Amino acid sequence: MKKLIILRRSSQAFFLLLFVYILWSTTYPLKGILPPETFFRTNPNIVIFTSVSERLFLPGLAVCLGMLVLTLFLGRFYCGWVCPLGTVIDLTGAARKKKIPVKGRAGAKLRKIKFFLLGAVLVSALFGVQAAWVLDPMVIMARFVSLNLIPAFTSVTDRFFVFLIRDLNLYGPVQDLYSSLKMSFLGVKAHYFANSGIIFVFFVLICITALLVSRLWCRFICPLGAFYSVVSRFAVLRRVADKCVSCGECVRNCRMGAINDDNSYVKGECILCMDCVYDCLHGGTRFTFFPAGRSSVLKKDENGKRGISRREFLFMVFSSVFVSGFKWGKKKENASPVIRPPGALREDEFLSRCVRCGNCMKVCPTNGLQPAMFQAGLEGIWTPHLVPEIGYCEYNCILCGSACPTGAIPRLKLEEKKKTKLGVANVDRSSCIAWVWNAECLICEEHCPVPEKAIRIKEFNIGGRSVRRPVVDPDLCIGCGICQTKCPVRPARAITVSPLGGQGSTG
């Protein structure tokens, strides 16, 4: 039996299911057995570079440093035994056995891409720009699960049960099962998210690359893999092939292309999949700590050089400085062009701290938090912003701050959150029913959650009769957006919320 491979696959399945469970159970109200930031705090790519870009120590820094210590002992185990995206890539790649081999100098040159990307993330962080989220595998996986998988699965399953019960009259046990599921995983609301199609396509493109080249993403692109690769070069667990007969079986089957034709291997590229242990027909391959003899570790690449050249390093630095131009180009007043979640940091700090994981959007009970595209500029892509046309900020909810893994949305106490200002409501007197038609409409005032009522009804004498019209008190308005959500005027609401610092005349 291939015990090590069975153990690895069991580990992959466990961590993938745990990852999905944590995101799935993070709903309203918060009830998961593990906090939503559990996995993110083990991610040095996110925690360390966000800490560097923000010049602070994020919670979880000790945890991710612990992961690096484990890497010094075991090597790049995270990519082969833990990473949720790596597991999905392996599952996708299993659909096609014959793949394009990328070895030798071509493989060595392509492997440098992920180190360029890692270097670009590091230099950008030094300039105050957090770019780790762009290609981080955990963020990509979390965004897919929260904004694609959970809404699609719950919606399809819910409609299937409704079809069985209502159209096929399968009441009794089927309805009882449906009711029990509605109390558990089907209880998660199936939300609509803008740009979810783009997020899905981006995720699928990453996965299907494994049909062409084994673990293409992990080998050539993933910055987190590059981070672990650098650390794992010093790992004490090493591959030993002291009975090698040069059959080449392990070289052909290595999913990371880490084993060379001379049976040496690039330790930083080995993810401990253990395939080579069982591919060896003579049982001559094993992994051991502090091997007494010469282990098959390749200390130089196929070109005989260590690391990247001076020209390549300078190119990496200059390209990173160009990316960091986002930081220099920000407006000094830090006014956000969109409505951010309650308590969100100043716009420049928020953009540096937010990793675009989708946790806050997924747990928003009204579906009001949506992923931005270009509403906040190119640097604000996929960050959360409130869209009152879709949903409002629930007055008694503090879940987005509880779900945020980096503190971009602080964890506010409920009483503090109720007083936190997101924006200001504005009445459009040219379309409001009460202002245009002199008809009575009190919907915005009735739904305003502020105890003192930020939207008040004032009486005006129009043509000799008393007409009541809504007026906003900008000092009391917190910009929750429920007035805009509930406004009956279409296609454009007669009352809208402007972000703090935004333009608009308050009625």
Image (spheres, helix red, strand yellow):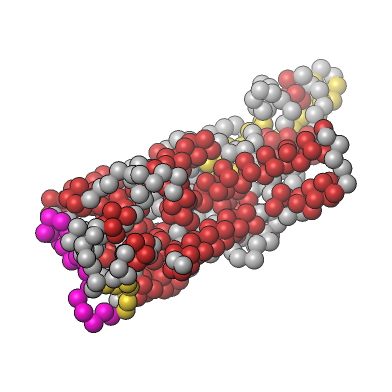
Which residue lies at the image location 79% right of the left edge and 38% below the top edge? Answer: 164
Give the quadrant of residue 86.
bottom left
Residue 425: x percent and y percent? 64, 37
Which residue lies at the image location 32% right of the left edge and 77% below the top edge? Answer: 288
The answer to whether 332 appears left or right of 364 in the picture is: left
Residue 448: x percent and y percent? 74, 42
Given residues 141 and 192, the one toward you in this image is 141
Q: Main secondary structure of the magenta part?
A: loop
* Above/below status of 433 relative to 181: above
The answer to whether 9 appears left or right of 224 in the picture is: right
* Above/below status of 82 relative to 234: above
Residue 47 lies in the magenta-colored region: no
Which residue lies at the image location 85% right of the left edge and 40% below the top edge? Answer: 170
Can residue 259 be spotted in the picture? yes
Span of residues in magenta: 290-307
**Of all residues shown, which one is farthest toward the top?**
463
Residue 296 lies in the magenta-colored region: yes
Given residues 419 and 459, the one toward you in this image is 419
The answer to whether 490 appears left or right of 400 in the picture is: right
